Amino acid sequence: MHIKIGTRGSRLALWQAYYVRDLLLTGGIDSEIVVIETKGDKILDRSLSKIGSKGVFTQELEDQLQSGEIDIAVHSAKDLQSQLDDAFEIIAFTEREKANDVLVSHNTALSLKSGETFVVGTSSTRRIAILKHFYPQIKTVDMRGNLQTRLRKLEEGQCDALLLAYAGVHRMEYDNKIAEHLLLDEFTPAVGQGSVAIECAVTLDERKKSLLKELLNHKETETCLLTERAFLKRLQGGCSIPVFGMATLNEDQIHITGGIVSLDGSELIRKTQTGAQAFPEELGLALADELLEAGADRILQSIRSQNTLA
Ligand SMILES: NCc1[nH]cc(CCC(=O)O)c1CC(=O)O
């Protein structure tokens, strides 16, 4: 059997594709990597919320899954929208890396906790709103592009530090620039952060599907991500909405903590729920419902009206 792996061309995306290729090789399966450029890779000068975030990094990959040019598409799980088109499915989530965010700088003495004022580069609405909530002394500047581009901008002095996912920083071997590991109960990650999702067309050969699942899927991570993604789907949070959520598994219990922050950081709602491992989606939906009742509904409304005005 031979598998064609579709991926975007950034260094992090290629790392993910080679990681999947290695897992397949360990199981005796040969594969090749097909690099596909997406709209999100081409458009760097406008904010994602303006080009319409839905599928900008996935459309071209899905086109090639559908036509059979590639067997699987490899994504950072957090970049994959919570509601896939009916023609596609996620067949595997790889084992999650540590999911926390980190502060990255040439000056590794920098710290949010220090209370000092400095400039942080990030385009994530979640990170900006959480910074405003817990660390109002910090200034932020918009910082798009892949990790290498952002690090170059840091080097040029456009900001003092970047706020990034540990997983990407570690995979790109920039660990020596980590100034601070941020707390999971302040900077709760985006849903899916740290795991790689494997997508295929529902029509893919069943033999291929079951072998891919066996070699690539990490059961515990899958349970956590199914919980988180059901939660996100109910809140309808794309990347332009500061929703956060993270599930962990302890014996046969899933714990999920999740919430939402208003764009100006003034209001942050967080809730935690625990449920049986056998019912991840139900737990994610229950947490979302609890949040909606506790005021997330109102925050979402106000964010949506601000986004349409922008
Ligand atoms: N939105 C871009 C993106 N998608 C996945 C990662 C990091 C790796 C991961 O979480 O899988 C990043 C960069 C970042 O947020 O720092």
Image (tube, rainbow, N blue to C red):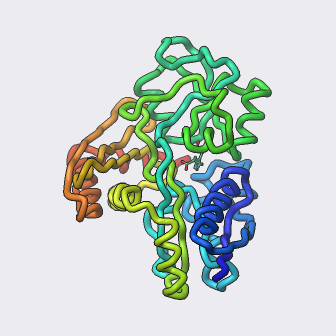
Relative to 235, residue 122 above or below: above
Foreground residue among 305 and 209: 209
Write the residue at 50% across / 17% down. 137
Task: Report the quarter where the N terminus lies.
Answer: bottom right
Residue 58 in view here: no
Q: Residue 39 vs residue 296: left or right?
A: right
Q: Where is residue 160 shown, x and y percent of the image?
A: 67, 22
Quarter-of-image position of residue 14: bottom right
Q: Residue 238 vs residue 36: left or right?
A: left
Q: Where is residue 2 shown, x and y percent of the image?
A: 67, 80
Q: Residue 269 vs residue 82: left or right?
A: left
Write the residue at 66% across / 27% down. 177
Quarter-of-image position of residue 103: top right
Write the residue at 61% across / 54% down. 50
Foreground residue among 31 and 79: 31
Q: Residue 173 vs residue 190: left or right?
A: right
Q: Where is residue 149 shown, x and y percent of the image?
A: 75, 41
Residue 220 in view here: yes
Q: Where is residue 106 shown, x and y percent of the image?
A: 70, 22
